[in-house]
Amino acid sequence: MDAALIERLTTQASTDGIQQLVVGAVVHYDGKVLLLQRPEDDFMGGIWELPSGKVEPGETLTQALIREVAEETGLGVTAVRIFLGSFDYRSGSGKPSRQFNFAVDVEKPDPVQLQEHDAYAWTALTEDPPVTDAVREILDAYQAV
C-alpha cells in the first residue's frame, strides 16, 4: 500500500476533526465478499458490515487492517490491494469516526472463525447485500475496479 496515500488520508482526517480512525476490509473470494453481522446488543446491533475495527495508537492503517481481519475472522491477509473510499459516522461513544476501506486478499477463505460477530456470509454483490448505504457505496466502488 502506498505510504504517501496513507499519510494523506490520516492527515486529512486529523484536519477534519476526526477523533477515531477505523479500517474496513472488502475480503473477496470466488466472486463473493465477506460480510459479518453485529451482535443484537452491540452498537448498531444486527447490521451486516465489512470486517472492520479501530486503529490502535502507534498502528498504521495497513497494520490495523491486517490485525482486525485476523481478530474478527481468523483469516490471514496476504495483500492490501486498493483503497476504496471512506465514510464518516459517530461511534457508540459519540466520537467523530472515519472508516477507511480497502480491498484485501487472504490466504484462504476458510475457516472463518468469528470472535466479535453473530454470523457471517459470503455474499455475491449481485444479491443486493443487506448493508448500510455507506457500506453499499464501498462495495459499488469495489465492483467498479
Image (cartoon, rainbow, N blue to C red):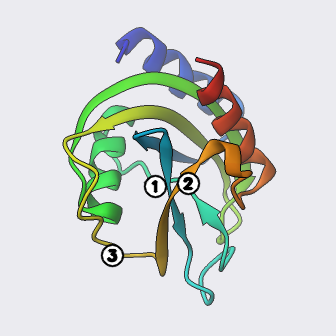
Residue 90, given in percent of the width and then of the height, sits at: 73, 58
Q: Nearer the viewer, mark 1 or mark 2?
A: 2
Tell me the quadrant of the picture where the N terminus can be found. Answer: top left
Q: Is residue 62 visible?
A: yes
- Identified by mark 1, the residue type is Pro
Mark 3 sits on what residue? 115
The local secondary structure at tag 3 comes to loop
Mark with earlier residue (2, 3): 3
Query: What residue is drawn where x is 49% and y is 64%?
Result: 121
The residue closer to the viewer here, 118 or 42, is 118
- Work out how far the residue at label 1 is from the one at label 2, CA to CA, in angstroms: 13 Å
Tell me the quadrant of the picture where the C terminus can be found. Answer: top right
Mark 2 sits on what residue? 123
Residue 140, given in percent of the width and then of the height, sits at: 70, 32
Query: What residue is drawn where x is 32% and y is 62%?
Result: 73
Mark 1 sits on what residue? 51
- Work out how far the residue at label 2 is from the one at label 3, CA to CA, in angstroms: 20 Å
- Identified by mark 2, the residue type is Thr
The residue closer to the viewer here, 93 or 27, is 27
3 versus 87 height, above or below: above
18 versus 94 height, above or below: above
Residue 113, given in percent of the width and then of the height, sits at: 27, 70
The local secondary structure at tag 2 comes to strand
The image quadrant that residue 6 belongs to is: top left
Query: What residue is drawn where x is 66% and y is 78%?
Result: 46
Query: What residue is drawn where x is 62% and y is 27%?
Result: 143
- Work out how far the residue at label 3 is from the one at label 1, CA to CA, in angstroms: 11 Å
- Identified by mark 3, the residue type is Gln
Q: Which mark is residue 100?
A: none
Q: Residues within 10 Å of mark 3 (few under 14, many from 20)?
A: few
18 versus 102 height, above or below: below
